[in-house]
Image: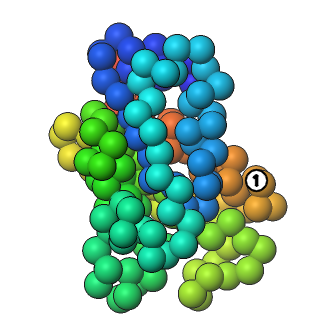
Amino acid sequence: MTALVAGLRARAETVATAESLTAGLVCGALTSIPGSSAVLRGGLVVYATDLKATLAGVDAALLAEHGAVHPSVAAQLAEGARDRCGATWGLGLTGVAGPDPQDGVAPGTVHLAVAGPNGTIVRTLTERGSRADVRAASVAAVLELLAERILPPMG
């Protein structure tokens, strides 16, 4: 994660989040790195479904049709975070941490997205374990997805 923050700083780019199941953990992880204040614009915690629309700009019709846990919702969360916070990059996360299903979606199902200057990419995960395990894996995965977009490949 230090390389990610350094990479953003070197590029003079910023990041913002719209987090549902992680409820701010991505911002917390980023701010654990010295120098993150130069790159983190802020974040939206949109745990309640209605806040995904009102704060992050997710289409209400999409939420009504598919529910809060859907790949397109993750994409719109990322785009909303980028737009509303004025960042170069937006990260969006939605999913079911468990232990129970939500709207028929199994625990461990996570959709994450990164929105940037060249478009939006979405990834879907299926994680096993406790709520904490699912949330931690989600944070790691979205930061890895961002790193894939901005850092040169290693090896």
Q: Nearer the viewer, residue 87 or 98?
A: 87
Question: How far across and how far down the image is residue 148, in percent?
Answer: 40, 32
Q: Residue at x 41, y 33 (%)?
A: 41
Q: Residue at x 52, y 14 (%)?
A: 35
Specify the farthest residue to the front. Answer: 54
Question: How far across and how far down the image is residue 21, in percent?
Answer: 60, 61
Horizontally, residue 129 falls left or right of residue 152, namely: right
Horizontally, residue 24 falls left or right of residue 52, namely: right
Specify the farthest residue to the right. Answer: 130
Q: Residue at x 63, y 34 (%)?
A: 29
Q: Can residue 19 be spotted in the picture?
A: yes
Q: Quadrant of the N terminus?
A: top right
Specify the farthest residue to the left. Answer: 118
Colour scheme used in the picture?
rainbow
Horizontally, residue 49 falls left or right of residue 80, namely: right
Q: Residue at x 38, y 80 (%)?
A: 63
Secondary structure beneath disc 1?
A: helix
Question: How far across and how far down the image is residue 84, in percent?
Answer: 30, 49
Instruction: Check the image and report above or below for 86 versus 134.
Output: above
Q: Residues within 10 Å of mark 1 (few under 14, many from 20)?
A: few
Q: Nearer the viewer, residue 93 or 150?
A: 93
User: What's under tag 1, amino acid-wise?
Assistant: Asp
Instruction: Check the image and report above or below for 97 versus 11.
Output: below
Horizontally, residue 100 falls left or right of residue 95, namely: right
Q: How many marks?
A: 1
Instruction: Check the image and report above or below for 59 versus 138.
Output: below
Residue 73 found in image quarter: bottom left
The residue indicated by pointer 1 is 133
Question: How far across and how far down the image is residue 96, in percent?
Answer: 62, 70
Q: Can residue 154 be spotted in the picture?
A: no
